[in-house]
Image (cartoon, rainbow, N blue to C red):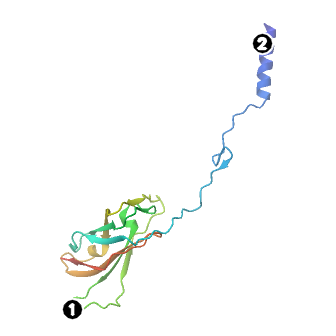
Amino acid sequence: MKLDGVIIGAALAALLASGCVSEAPDEDQVGHVSMKRPASVTYEQIDSGDMKLEPVGELRLTAGTPGVIGIQLTNHGIKDVQIPEWYMVDQYNFAVYYRRLPDDRPVDPAAPYQCYRVKIPFKPRPVHSELQLKPHNRALMTVALPFISELAPGEKAEFQVYVATALMTFKIQTAPFTVMTQ
């Protein structure tokens, strides 16, 4: 019996000395293929030739309240349009350009537009959600007009506005339109 204990002990010692160690695989290595992520994501430029961006719905808003309008992006082409850079938060995709129209004279065509663009936070990182539009389909989004809430309640004003995409890969804008307050 003493001999059996010696044999078991020797076998156990040999097993420990053999160096059988389970090794965790490197996270960047799967087999022999290196899985490295790019430092930044780049998208290719998307042609907006058959696309149209236009306001929809009510353009008469109440002064002193949060102003929100609807914007419609329509694919008039015969091919699908995919925009991988599209953000899930509508406001991150657009910049609003506006100027107040004078009450007593025509607008000066050289008068500058002011720009409103939401600052996209770094943390938490905003989520992209590819926008795909089939031929003759449209997407409806909402866009905030913060200058409406800066007016006194009941103040009448007119603004010339246009909305443009704030994306790096997809550039399109509306024709100028008028927003009135009451």
* x, y percent for residue 141: 32, 64
Front residue of 30/23: it is 30
Quadrant containing the N terminus in the rendered view: top right
Residue picked out by circle 1: 104
Residue 151, given in percent of the width and then of the height, sits at 25, 77
Q: Secondary structure at mark 2?
A: helix
Residue at image point 36% right, 64% down: 90
Q: Residue 91 location, x and y as percent?
A: 36, 66
The amino acid beneath tag 2 is: Gly
Is 67 positioned to the left or the right of 171 in the image?
Answer: left
Image quadrant in which you'd find residue 89 = bottom left
Q: Residue at x 76, y 21 (%)?
A: 12
Give the residue at x 27% y 89%: 107
Q: Mark 2 sits on what residue?
A: 5
Residue 72 showing in the rendered view: yes
Q: Quadrant for residue 2, please give it.
A: top right
- The quadrant of the picture occupied by the C terminus is bottom left
Number of marks in picture: 2
User: With 31 as the anchor, is 157 left or right in this view?
Assistant: left
Helix, strand, or loop for circle 1?
loop
136 shown above or below 109 = above
